[in-house]
Amino acid sequence: MRSVTVSIDVPQTPEQVYDFLDVMAHHERFTDHYLTNWRYSGPARGIGSGATVTAALGGTEADVTIEVVEAEPPRRIVERNISAAGRRRAHGTYDIEPLPAGDGSRVSFTYAWVRAPLTDRLLAPAVRAMMRRANRTVMRRLATELAESGSRRRQAP
């Protein structure tokens, strides 16, 4: 199946975005519209940090295991996702680039299937559209969380 990529521009630097995304628990704050019941594992940040979540999309629910398998500060985080009893394997990749004018970052998230169950493959256009829609919402919510996170840091004594 072809991958799905969504992007958003934010005013934070790549370092600020990476520092926020590097903490697995922060992901719950901007993905809980379709990923719930977060159970964390491994370190809080970096390679090996992970979670098992319940994904609810398209009227179905499935547990998904997420683990960070690659990290290149401040530009890239790669997560491995396993669900459907191992029949669905994918990588979720956050790429963070400075904006050309130097006034923020472009954050892109790519969901790339490595293996997909037959039903996903048969319904590929609908599955991809559903993932694109959900991840566009993720990016908008991420931008909000980054802004709020910055406000909280500025208000700390």
Image (tube, helix red, strand yellow):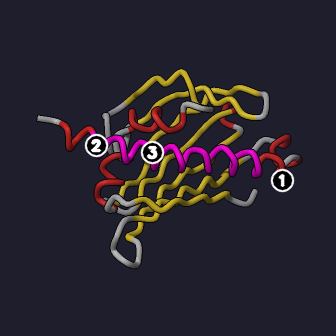
For this orientation, the residue located farthest to the left is 157
Q: Mark 3 — residue?
A: 144
* Amino acid, disc 3: Thr
Tell me where the magenta segment starts and ends, as one range. Answer: 128-151
N-terminal of the pair, mark 3 or mark 1, is: 1
Q: Secondary structure at mark 1?
A: helix
* Magenta span main SS: helix
* Whole-number angstrom distance, CA of label 1 to CA of label 2: 39 Å
The residue shown at (62%, 59%) is 5
Q: Secondary structure at mark 3?
A: helix
Left or right position of 143 against 152: right
Residue 114: percent from the left, percent from the top? Answer: 66, 52
Q: Are marks 3 and 1 in contact (CB under 8 Å)?
A: no
Q: Mark 2 — residue?
A: 151
* Whole-number angstrom distance, CA of label 3 to CA of label 2: 11 Å
N-terminal of the pair, mark 1 or mark 2, is: 1
Location of the N terminus by quadrant is bottom right
Q: Judge the density around disc 3: few (<14), some (14-19), many (≥20) Cα neighbours within 10 Å.
A: some
* Amino acid, disc 2: Ser
For residue 125, the mark is 1
N-terminal of the pair, mark 3 or mark 2, is: 3
Q: Secondary structure at mark 2?
A: helix
